[in-house]
Image (tube, rainbow, N blue to C red):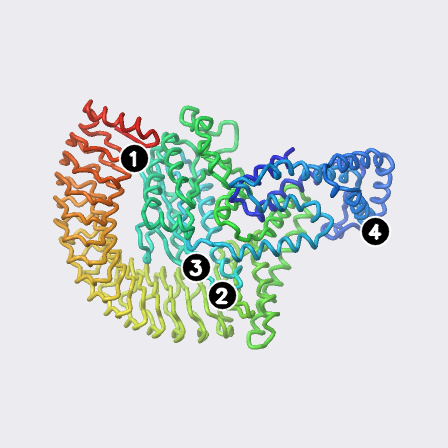
Amino acid sequence: SDFFTFVREAFFDPDLSLSVFLARLERLVIPIFERFLRQDIASGVIKQPQKKSEVGGGLSPGDKESLAKAVKKSRQSGSDRAKQNAEKRFADSKSDEFSKQEIKTMLEIKEKTDTVYWQLMDLWGVFLQTVRDTEVVLESGHRSGQNLEVSEFVRQLPNFLVNPDQLRIFSRRLIEQAKESTRPKQIELFLVVDLSGSMDAQKRRATQEAVYCLAKSLLQYQQNSRLQADDPTTEIIRLNLRVLGFGDRSEDLLLRSPNEENQGFLETEDQAEIDNRLWHSIMDIGKKSLGGTRDSESLQEVLRDLDRPDKQDQMAAKDSVAVVIEVTDGETTTASESAAIVKSIRSNPGAHACGIRIPGLLSSDTPRVPRSQEVDTAAEPEILSESGAFGIVWGEHGQQLTSIEKLKEVMISVLFAALLKQTWQTSLVSLETAKNRFQETGSDEDKKVFDEALAELKQAKQEYLKDAYTKQDFEGQEVIAVEAMILRTMNELLVVGGGENIYEFNVSPDGRIVSLTVTYNQSTNQSTRIQEAINLVGGFKELQIFDCSNNPNLTSLPELPSSLQRLSCSNNPNLTSLPELPSSLQTLNCSYNPNLTSLPELPSSLQELNCFNNPNLTSLPELPSSLQELYCSNNPNLTNLPEFPSSLQRLNCSYNPNLTSLPELPSSLQILSCHNNPNLTSLPELPSSLQTLNCSYNPNLTSLPELSSSLQTLDCYNNPNLTSLPELSSSLQILFCHNNPKLTSLPELPSSLQRLNCSYNPNFISLPELSSSLQILSCHNNPKLTSLPELPSSLQRLDCYNNPKFISLPELPDSLTSINIQKTKAAEDPEVIKKLNAFKKKHPQAEVLY
């Protein structure tokens, strides 16, 4: 019954990959067999091995003889009944494929393996018949949304059981299909984290662990994506990561990346950079408390971001998938409102959302959400049914996470189900099952054997590392490739088994080790081994990527190989200098190094330089003519910047308190972030190529230069002395100018503008004529605003709440999906209320708040 229900649900889950299906199937079936095995051991039919030599190493001859006698005795008493049951089940099957050949094959297996006996044969017959019963569902017709991979596997399962070669052929075909399938170019991951007053210390610790595991799983997928593809030119999937905390308000927890295009997002391929920022966010989860119990504001932020036209286009073209995960204890006062927002999020193509509940004390007095605050799941079945692979009820904020194993199961189903037809390794799931079995049900001797196996694995891993190192200058490329893959597998096994994660490898198709990561793990304190590994770097003649970040005892680097293209040495608190950089280097990340005071001469091939968060860095060397991206934010002792090369396209020099001015900007510059510079008084002339400008949080900035004709995004909010804006570019799509107390009006808005936020401007009296393409208008908390101009037919969301003098409302276009005029005089006007009620009646799906 459990198996039938499981397969039926999987079949109608189009986002569930076959590999995850198999892993879950294994977890479902194996415990059933183990339960029968324990029953027979308890009844004396099977004798449990007791000798040390027998644990993990098979049965001794004496026990095999005892086992054979026990099986023979059991066979004499129960064989007829079990055989009749098994034959009846096969006979009841409606297909000739389930002939006596299956029984014959099983009998042959039984004769060869003493541990297979009639009781398990009976159960195996139930299993096979259930597969046949599942055909009733499979033959009901291939409707839209059915999982054809899972259905074909279930159809073929009886053949696979008696013919393993057919299973291999099937697996190879799936892999080929996966290679040919469309893969997204980027993943938008939103983590919405509960920082409300109900979160005690235990829940916060559980939340920290959940967020870290979720994000790290996605990072591991990105790291392996190129390795899993045969083509080394395969583009690595870009990660856009945002962490939002909620309570009485919403707050970004993720430190703003120096190479971001949008506030709060992390857009980088550098895993060390992501790790550092993620770690700071996780620390905030443990320290911050935002009070309250409102999650709707954070979810609304997510929806607003996904509603951006560029994001909509990417998801519609399947270039991007969005995964929204809320981690909470479930005590929220806005559950119904949040469910409506989640429904809107899921209505976007390629967008997925789920909730994960973090439990408190696992006892009878565990706090629960009051029934009055829960979503009525019966009233909104569509929210549940369209959740696809997530299969988690949002109204209950997900499944109880009672263990890390449960968390990993949720992680796989949420994060990887969004990536259709991507192969996923299930061998680690088997190891986790084995490890848990040793820890939960095994004897002390079992655990000792498991630990000894891990110790041998660590030693073998070191030997493989040295072996692969010595072969770098020889021709045995295929051997090197195999050994390097073994190294990666060893590393994963050690991590799952509770060991360290020191070495990680990537391998080119011709077998060369092209990427090496050497990372410190505090729980193992292997600083000596780390230094040994780093000293090997010079011998890897084909090494292209080297990451030695997060090593607290690292003081220097050896000579680097001439082939190196990417170097990441961030977050090394005792690193004081860098060696000479190879001429081949294209990317350098030396951020978060508190004792780094200067940089060496930069090679002429360098295209990207990350040197942010270095508190003792006082200056930068001459920038090479090839440089395209420069990220030098949050360097408090940096007083000026060198001349920019003409090739520069992206610049982030934010959070530099002693920076007073910028050099002349190159004509190639496309993105400029210079926010949070308290002593910056003006900006230089902007190049015509500039597309994005963020100059927010600059208290001494009084005006802006003439804007570029190609500018698409302008962020100039929270500038207390900004008195006016220049003429806006005809290509401008996004304008954020909120919280500028001296700003009294806006210039003429271009017809291209799609999103406008002019909230929290106390001296705003009116708005100019709105753009014909405007989709989102936020003009709330403007105490002097009395009315709005005519609303365009393109407008989808209108937020003008908390405007005490707002007295009238223009005609509402049919395009609106959300209106909020709460805490305004207009909300008390009977005519306005009548207009809103009529609109709500005409558009029942729209959100209308007054």
Residue occupied by mark 1 = 818
Secondary element at tag 1: strand
Q: Amino acid at mark 1?
A: Ser
User: Closer to the camera: disc 2 or disc 3?
Assistant: 2
Please provide percent x and percent y for residue 600.
Answer: 34, 72
The reply, left or right, for residue 558 in relation to residue 702 is: right
Up/down of 564 relative to 503, above or below: below
Q: Residue at x 36, y 53 (%)?
A: 266
The reply, left or right, for residue 694 in relation to residue 574 is: left
Q: Farthest residue toward the top?
A: 830
Secondary element at tag 4: helix
Secondary element at tag 2: loop
Q: Residue at x 85, y 45 (%)?
A: 68
User: Closer to the camera: disc 4 or disc 1?
Assistant: 1
Residue occupied by mark 2 = 232
Whether label 2 touches label 3, CB < 8 Å: no
Tell which circle, 3 or 4, labels the residue nearer the N-terminal end.
4
Q: Residue at x 56, y 58 (%)?
A: 491
Tell which circle, 4 or 1, labels the residue nearer the N-terminal end.
4
Residue occupied by mark 4 = 61
Q: CA distance from mark 2 to mark 4?
A: 51 Å
Q: CA distance from mark 4 to mark 1?
A: 75 Å
Tell which circle, 2 or 4, labels the residue nearer the N-terminal end.
4
Secondary element at tag 3: loop
Please provide percent x and percent y for residue 626.
Answer: 32, 71
Q: CA distance from mark 1 to mark 3?
A: 46 Å
Q: Quadrant of the N terminus?
A: top right
Q: CA distance from mark 2 to mark 1?
A: 46 Å
Residue occupied by mark 3 = 550
Up/down of 32 relative to 528, above or below: above
Disc 2: CA contacts within 10 A as few (<14), some (14-19) or many (>=20): few
Q: Amino acid at mark 3?
A: Asn
